[in-house]
Amino acid sequence: MTATATLVKGIRTVKYIPSLGEHQLSINLGLADHATVFEFARTQGFVPEIVQISTVQGLEIHALLLSERVDQSPLNGSNLSEALDYLADKINADAIRHVYGRFTT
């Protein structure tokens, strides 16, 4: 069973699964302290955009930190990995959403 989500006007909607070759890093603001998220974004050089993502559970509001096309190389190397580990210690780790677009079969 899927939940019906009413989209919020004026907020960009981001696909749950990115297009092939794209990745997104966002933080679910319903699960994380907003001040901590925005301070993390500032220290990492991100400019967050408030977006909505429709999921099977309903509508989620996220701070989108990164959305871009990638090649086969890892995203920003180990620096981002270490930063995300740090953030996961400060907020609910379930709020962190880092997804890649892929082929579906």
Image (spheres, helix red, strand yellow):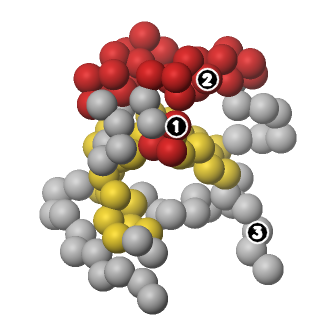
Give residue 34's position: percent from left, percent from top.
27, 31
Regarding residue 16, the answer to whether it shows in the image is: yes
- Mark 3 and mark 1: Cα distance apart in space: 26 Å
Q: Which residue is mark 1?
A: 93
Tag 3 secondary structure:
loop
In the image, taking residue 5 as reference, residue 91 lies left or right, namely right
The vertical placement of 41 against 94, above or below, is above
The residue depicted at 67 percent of the width and 24 percent of the height is 81
Q: Which residue is mark 3?
A: 103
1 or 2: tag closer to the N-terminus: 2
Quarter of image, res 9 = bottom left
Q: Quadrant of the C terminus?
A: bottom right
The vertical placement of 14 against 32, above or below, is below
Tag 2 secondary structure:
helix
Give residue 94's position: percent from left, percent from top.
51, 45
The residue depicted at 66 percent of the width and 17 percent of the height is 82
Marks 2/3 in contact by CB < 8 Å: the verdict is no
The residue depicted at 67 percent of the width and 51 percent of the height is 100
Q: Which residue is mark 2?
A: 85
